Image (cartoon, rainbow, N blue to C red):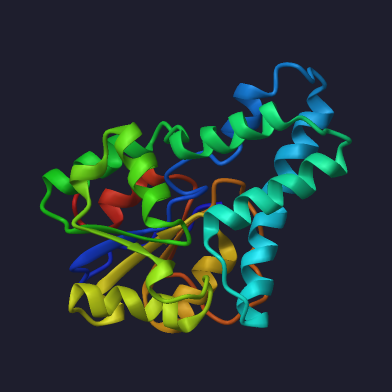
Amino acid sequence: MSTMAEPLTGIRACLFDVYGTLFDVHAPVSSRLIRVGDPAVERALSDTWRRKQLEYTWLRTVMGEHVDFWTITGQALDYAMASVGLNDKVLRAKLMEAYLALPPFPDTRPVIEALSAAGMPLGILSNGTPVMLSAVLATAGLTGHFSQVLSVESVGAFKPAREVYAFGPEALGMAPHEIAFVSSNGWDIAGAAHFGYSAVWINRGDLPADGLPGTPKAVLGGLSQLPALLGRA
């Protein structure tokens, strides 16, 4: 699904979500789970890991019991492995290690380089810890393109809490509507748009919109249309 609109005006910077937007969160299972060999088990493991990872961020924020995203990622993996009958500490360690070196989607590097070359200030606003974000960006060779790498650890809550989204305008010294917030996660886009960002949903899975407050300025099927949308083609 793509609802490419006229180029957005008044955008002074662009903030990106990381996991699922710039980097493929399902790659660790598909690339490392060679000893299982059952595609159905692999899909179940990867899908459950990601689902529980997100659920734990939301639930812990509501409960007021914050732990960092690396801890949550490990706890979600433990649940996912148990759910498919796996008890392999070596495999667990390899999957966690792989999360620090997730591969970028094919459209990530060209778009980031194009926007950077066009003079658009770029930043990250992510649930990831500073160490996780530093590692994944460095592995992909993208670190130098981002002037701000903002982690929720500075706030002590996870998206879509309003205090997380408020961190972006504070760091950039701009109004929320002057910042394009780009994410592949529909719930994240709803939260960002509701806060006041000019939200752009990268709807990689052609999913229906969530029934939540907050409407994106545009819906794109991938990142490749983003420079044109931001007037930086």
Please tell me in which quadrant of the rendered image residue 66 appears: bottom right
Question: In the image, is 133 to the left or to the right of 186?
Answer: left
Please tell me in which quadrant of the rendered image residue 198 appears: bottom left
Residue located farthest toward the front when viewing the structure as drawn: 89
Please name whichever residue, 20 or 203, is drawn nearer the observer in this view of the structure: 20
Q: Position of residue 213 (x, y in %)?
A: 58, 82
Residue at 61%, 51% in the rendered image: 73
Question: In the image, is 192 to the left or to the right of 32?
Answer: left
Residue at 33%, 33% in the rendered image: 140
> Vertically, is 45 above or below 6?
above
Question: In the image, is 65 to the left or to the right of 173?
Answer: right
Q: Is residue 208 visible?
A: yes
Residue at 27%, 51% in the rendered image: 228
Q: Position of residue 20 (x, y in %)?
A: 52, 47
Q: Position of residue 179 (x, y in %)?
A: 28, 71
Q: Is residue 233 visible?
A: no
Please name whichever residue, 126 or 192, is drawn nearer the observer in this view of the structure: 126
Q: How many marks?
A: 0
Question: In the image, is 178 to the left or to the right of 20?
Answer: left
Please name whichever residue, 4 or 220, is drawn nearer the observer in this view of the structure: 220
> Vertically, is 46 above or below 182?
above
Q: Position of residue 118 (x, y in %)?
A: 12, 48
Please name whichever residue, 26 or 202, is drawn nearer the observer in this view of the structure: 26
Residue at 43%, 68% in the rendered image: 152
Please tell me in which quadrant of the rendered image residue 86 appears: top right
> Vertically, is 120 above or below 82?
below
